[in-house]
Amino acid sequence: MSRRTIVDISMIVLMPLLMAYSLIGETFHEVAGTAMLVLFIVHHVINRASLKAVGRGKYTPKRVLREAVNVLLFVFMILQPLTGIMMPKHLYTFLHIAGAAKARQIHLCLAYWGFTLMSLHAGMHMGSLVVKIKADKVRARVVATMVAAISLYGVYVFINRGFAGYMLMTQKFAFYDFGEPAVLFVLDYITVIVLFMLIGWITQRGPRIVEKKQL
C-alpha cells in the first residue's frame, strides 16, 4: 500500500470520528483534529505535483468544479483547526485565545462543510479504484448496488441529522443523543461520506458515460 493511500484512508477514517465529538471524547477530538491537520499537510506534500499543474492545461467545466472544491476544501481545512485552537479544553489551553463562543459556531459550520467537501474531493479522485472494481462485472454490480443503497440512506441521514442547518449556521449548537451508541453515529456519517463520494465521482465521470452512450 502506497503512502498516499495510507494517508487518504487515515483521513477518511478520522472524518466520522471527529464529527462524533462529545460521543467519542473531547480529548480524543482535539488529538484527532491535530492528526487530521498533519495528514492534510502530508497529503498536499505527497500530491505537490498536482498543485504545480493548477495553472496548466485546459479548464473544462469538470476541472473548474474540481479545482473549486479543492480551493474551498483547502481554506476550510486550514480554518477548522484555527477556530478549534481558539476554544481549547485540553491540548491548547496554554494559548488563552479570546472569542471561544463565536469560534465554536464557526468551527461547527466549517466542520460540516469540510466533511462534505472532503467526501466530494475523494469521490472526484477515485477513478482508478472504480476501474479496478469494473474489471469484474459481477463484483461491479454488487458494489454498485451497495453504494446506491448506502447513498440513499445517506440522503436520509443528511436530512435527519440536520447537516443543512449546521452548514448554513441556522443551527449554532451541536446536539447529541448520549443514549445512542457512538458506533451507530459513526456508521450514519459514513453513509453520508459514501453519498458525497458518489456525487463527486458522478460530476467527473457521469458526463463521459452519457457521451459514450450517445455515440
Image (spheres, helix red, strand yellow):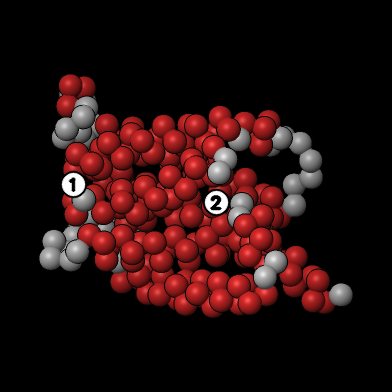
Q: Residue furthest right?
A: 215
Res 7 seen here? yes
Residue 194 percent location from the top left of the image: 47, 63
Residue 165 seen by the camera? no
Relative vertical location of residue 189 with respect to residue 46 in this rendering, above or below: below
Report the front residue among 91 and 214: 91
Q: Residue 25, which numbered label?
A: 1
The structure residue drawn at horizontal position 18% and vertical position 46%, both measured from the top left corner, is 25
**Percent position (x, y) of residue 204?**
66, 59
| Residue 41 horizontal side relative to residue 87, left or right | right
Residue at horizontal 67 percent and vertical 49 percent from the top: 64
Identify residue type, mark 2: His
User: In the visual, does 70 lie left or right of 92?
Assistant: right
Quadrant the C terminus occupies: bottom right
In the displayed image of the protein, which residue is found farthest to the top? 94
Q: Which mark is residue 121?
A: 2
Which amino acid type is marked by label 1?
Gly
Q: What whole-number distance in Å separates the C-alpha atoms at marks 2 and 1?
A: 27 Å
Q: Quadrant of the N terminus?
A: top right
Relative to 150, residue 60 above or below: above
- Neighbours of disc 1 within 10 Å: few (<14), some (14-19), many (20+): few
- Which label sits in the foreground, 2 or 1? 1
How packed mark 2 is, by other alpha carbons closer than 10 Å (few <14, some 14-19, many 20 or more), is many
Left or right of residue 144: residue 91: left
Judge left or right: residue 142 versus residue 103. Answer: right
Residue 72 appears at what percent x and percent y? 51, 44
Res. 10 image quadrant:
top left
Which residue is depicted at the point 22% across and 60% down? 182
Q: Which structural element holds mark 1?
A: loop
Counting residues from the N terminus, which is met first, the one under dot 2 or under dot 1?
A: 1
At 41% across and 32% down in the image, what residue appears?
Answer: 38
